[in-house]
Each structure stands twice: as C-alpha cells, then as structure tokens.
Image (tube, rainbow, N blue to C red):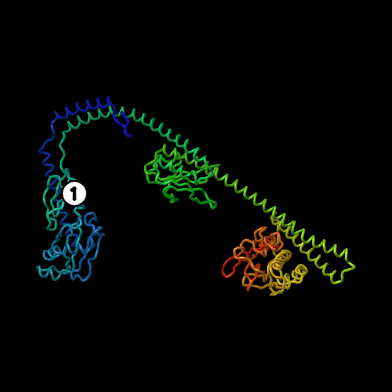
Amino acid sequence: MAAGRGRLRPGGTAIAAALAVVLIGSALAWLISSYDGTQRHKTELAAADAATGTLARRALALGQVVGAPSEALALIRFSEIPAVLSVDAKRSGPPTLIRGQLPPGLDAARITATARTAMEVARDTGEAQAAPLTGGLVPLAVAVLPSTSAPSGTAARRAQVTSWRIALLSPEGVLAGLPATSPRAVGFRVDGTPIGDVSGPRAGTVLVAGQPWTLFMARPGAPISRGALGTLAVSLLGAAACLLADVRVQRALSRERTASAALERETRTVAELGPLLQSSLDLAEVMPAVALRLADEFALSRFSVQLVGEQGHLVDVFALGGSTRNTGNEVDVTPGNVDELPAGVTGCLPLLRAGRTIGRLSFVGHRALGQPQLAALSAASDLIAVATYNVELYEREQASVRRLRELDQLKDAFLSTISHELRTPLTAISGFIRLLRDRWDQLREEQRKEFLDRVHGNTLSLGLLVDDLLDFARLERQALNAPPTPMSLDQQVEKSLAQLAPVLGAREVVSELQPVRALANAGALERVLANLLTNAAKFSPADSRIVVSVRCNRDHAALEVADQGSGIAAEDRERVFARFYRGESDAARGTRGAGIGLSVVRELVHQMGGTVMALPNTPQGTRMVVQLPLEDAASPVVPSVNGAHAHAERSTT
C-alpha cells in the first residue's frame, strides 16, 4: 500500500488479489436468482396503505384536539404543531399566542390574514379547515363555540362563534410521526409545494382539513437475493483480508515516517529558535521573530507570552494576533496531558525556570495540533523560559548596579554636606573664641555677651545636627524607637519651646496652645519640634514670625508649626521626606542642611502612631502639621486634609 497526501493507498499486488476475489464473487452472485418481485410489490403497497391511513387518522385527531379545551393542547407534539394562536371573534385585539413560539419570519398578523378564508369555512362547517402553506407551515383554523348548546345551523354557528384557534401544522413534523414502514414515507406535496423527498413513488392523496396532501414513499433499491448477498459478502471479506494485511504493514511504516518527520521538525525548530533567542537580551527585539517562526511552522492564529508580575498576576509581554486572555477554557498541553489540541482551542504551556513558574505561553491553531507539534511547541516554551529568565537576571543585575551607583552618589553628597555643616558652626565657634581670647580687654561687656551667645547658638546648632546624625544612624539600623505614652501635649510643647529658645535667637515665636492630652514621646516630640522650628527659621524672613499651635480635633491632636517663608511647591510636598532631599528652590540652595531632618521627623512621628504633612500657609509660607492620637484613641490617626489623604516632605537643614 502506498502513501499519498497523508492517506494510505493499496499496493499493486494487494489490488490484483482483491480484484480477483471480487470478480469471482460477482459472477457467482449474478447466477443466483433475485427475490420474488411480486412479493416485493405487495410489501410496498402495504407500506403505502399503512402510511396514508395513519396520515388520515392523525390529521383528523389533530383537528379535534385543536378545537378541544385548552388543556388538551398539551397532548400535541411540538414537532407537529409548534404554535397555536387564538383570534377573538369580534377582533377586538391582536391574535394571542396560547402555545409554543412562532418560527422566525412569521408573525401573528400574517398568519391570521392567510387563514382568513379558512376561518370562515371552519366557522360555517364546524370542522377544521387548512389554509395555504405559509413559511413551511399549514395554518389549521378551528372555530371555538360555547359548550352550553350545539348550534342548529350555519347562521347560529356564525352568531355563537367566540373565537378561532389557528394551529400551525408542520408537514415535516407529521412526516416524522408516520410509522417506520419499509419502504417508509419520505415526503409530501402540499399546495403544490414539495416537502421532503418527492422523487419516489406516490403512495396516495389524503385530505388534511380539506387540503389535499400527496404522500410519497422512498424509492426501493434493487433487490439482491440472500444467496447473492452472501456470496458478495464472502468475496468482499476475502478482498478486505488481502487489503488489510497490506494496510497494517503500511500503517506501521507510516507511523514510523510520521514520528521521524515530527522529531526532525522539533529538532529543527529548537535548533533555529535557540540562537535567535540568545541573540539579544531585549525580548521586544527577538520575540516577534520567534512568534512569526512558530506561527508559520504550526499555522497559529494567535500567540502570546505572559510573565508573572509583581502582584502574582500574569502580565502580557508579547502578543501576535491578539492576546489570549485567561478565560478558564485553556487546555494545558504539557507533554503527556493531551494527544491533540483541536483547531480554535487555546492551548497553554507553563514557562518554568529554577523550579518555579515564571510565565505562560498561549497559542491557538488554525488546524488541529498533534503530539509531534505539541512536543515541538513545548521545546520552544523551554527556550523562551530560559531567555526570559536570563533577561530577568540581567535586569536585576542592572538595577543593582544602578542602585549601588545611586547609593555611592548619595554617600558622596552626604559626606560633602555633613563636612560643610560640621565645619560651618565649628569655624564660627573657633572664630568667636579666638576673638574673645585675643581682645577680651578691648571688648565691651555687651560685645562679649553677644559673642558668647553666638558661640552658644552655634553649639546648639551643632548639637542638633549631631542628634540628627545619631537618629539617622538608628533609622538606618531600624533601631529608632519612640514608644508613645499619655501626656499633656500643650505642656510638653511649651517646655520644649523654652529649651529651644537659644537656638532660635531673636526670632519671634508665637504659641497658641490648647489643653489636650495625647499619646506621644517626650524626647521624640522635642526632636520633632526642634527640626520643624529650625526649618521654619531657615526658610522664612528673619523679621517674620513663627506660629506654634496645639489643638484638639475630632479624633486626633494636632501640633502645627507655621512660617511665612516662600513655601513648598506642590510637586515637592511628596518628596521632602526623602533622605538627603533638599529641593531645587532658591531658598533651599541658599541655606545649610544635610537633608535628613524631616526623614527623622517622619520616622519619629510614625513611631508615636501619628502622621506629618506639609500644607500651604495663608497668605504665604508652609504649615507643618503633626497629627497624634488622643489619649483615649483606639487606633492610629489616619491623616485627612480637606477630604484627601496627604503626606508631607520637606528639606530639614
């Protein structure tokens, strides 16, 4: 047997042997007599009589049931009468569908208009009357009369009719309900329209509700005697035996060729995709070529690659022919799961690397994909998984390198800033002390006091900077701890203001303190207030005042430090809490500072269960607002400003 276009064909030797067997059997069958023709003709006549008799009885029964009470309609099969309409005799309203559904393309008005003559005849005769064929169905009209008395004549019937019922009779459904004779009824001719097969012999004509239906039987085949049939069967079996032996051999050879071709295709695909995927670490550059290669090779209509995102959900990274979203109808075609993927069905393969699933390969074929094709696609998915994992490792390495460079730049900037911040107060302290030492006798008393006050102020500034550095070191070690305890917030703020007076010098500080008890830490509160006050002093004019207020809101205590400086730009209010961030404004560039104070403020406030935010002041300046939980608060404060959540960030020094 030879293979051609994917089908097995018999070989020359097998065909010759089979033909010899068939010819001998045919010759023997030709010699055997056929069945008795007369008996066959009687059988056909009996089948025709049975079919026409059943049709006449069924038509009469259907007409009676349609005119019976509504409960009797349940006895009718939907295949014979799919719908029944009720038409009021006074025509006061549209026809009503009382059973079933109207077929598409037909409406009640059209059916009623077609059956109008049949309705009048049914009213006058008292019998069911068929209307012309409409949409493949025959409207069967029956007049409905009151059940109290029988009408005496046509005039009485016309007067007593209350409604009509129009049953849509399906010739095809009636045909299906006829008995299974041999040969059987296969068609009608109704109103000159053929229904079913009308090419066979005519069995007879039956009046169905006054409408002639001509019944046709199936055309009998040429009879073959049992002896001839047996002889032909034996000869065909012999021929089939000859062919079967050859088919088995050729089928085994075909399977071997198919397996070999599939292995060659898989090997070639893997060999071509490997170097292509390794040619670049940019998936956007190589994935289109890979997708087109696979789509051409396996007749794929859609192809997509999805990777697991940060939230654990699949994220599309490439799609050809539309994304294959996860609908729950995908078939896992991992080798061993399925033998074949039907055309138009989405198949998926997991992308596995380092013992974990990193994504998914999804595809839809124009044609069915067998095991060889699925095995090749599985090998391709392994290569894509390796390439994707390599890209992921490369991106992680690049991100680490960028992070290290940023940290190195921050370190250099931090060391430079801290060196300057330490040297500035030390230089001032050293200069004033040298001046006092060398000119003590020449200086007046008030000058000596002024110089000593400046030394003291610079010493306090240096102390605050050292405290910031220590707090920042604890923050880096995650060792910063400020557990809150109940306290009188207004009294603690007043005490801290008194201690910070030398740092502020001659700056006017106005306090507006309302009595309120809150959860806070005394040391942390002093550090927070010191940083906020020094910031306000540095970023506002020397002749302006700073307002420190404490008040009790509905669900939290608020500590506010307001200045009249240039303010903070809206886009910077979310960034000023970042470590080492000092901003790009002229005020920030013109003042000293390491950019760590407000990051420490935020951490300390969070340690106390509160929040801090930067808001614009009126008419200008900045309001730094710290919200702390009240003494009896059961949960941390959720900051809210004008109905919106906010977080404040500002440069510290």
The secondary element bearing badge 1 is classed as strand
Whether residue 213 is visible here, answered yes or no, is yes
Residue 433 vs residue 176, the one in the foreground: 433
- Tell me if 76 is positioned left or right of 447 in this view: left
Badge 1 crowding class, 10 Å Cα cut-off, few under 14, some 14 to 19, many 20 or more, is: some
Quadrant for the N terminus in the image: top left
- Tell me if 303 is positioned left or right of 30 in this view: right
State the image coordinates of residue 14 (x, y, percent, origin top left). 27, 26
State the image coordinates of residue 74 (x, y, percent, origin top left). 24, 59
Position of 374 relative to 60 (above/below): above
Residue 262 vs residue 370, the one in the foreground: 262
Q: Which residue is mark 1?
A: 196
Q: Please tell me which residue is depicted at 47% across the width and 37% down the height of the picture.
A: 272
Q: Please tell me which residue is depicted at 34% across the width and 27% down the height of the picture.
A: 249
Residue 76 vs residue 11, the one in the foreground: 11
Q: Please tell me which residue is depicted at 72% across the width and 62% down the height of the picture.
A: 592
Whether residue 562 is visible here, answered yes or no, is no
State the image coordinates of residue 224 (x, y, percent, origin top left). 16, 34
Residue 33: image quadrant is: top left
Position of 80 relative to 540 (above/below): above
State the image coordinates of residue 375 (x, y, percent, origin top left). 44, 38
Identify residue type, mark 1: Gly
Residue 474: image quadrant is: bottom right
Quadrant for the C terminus in the image: bottom right
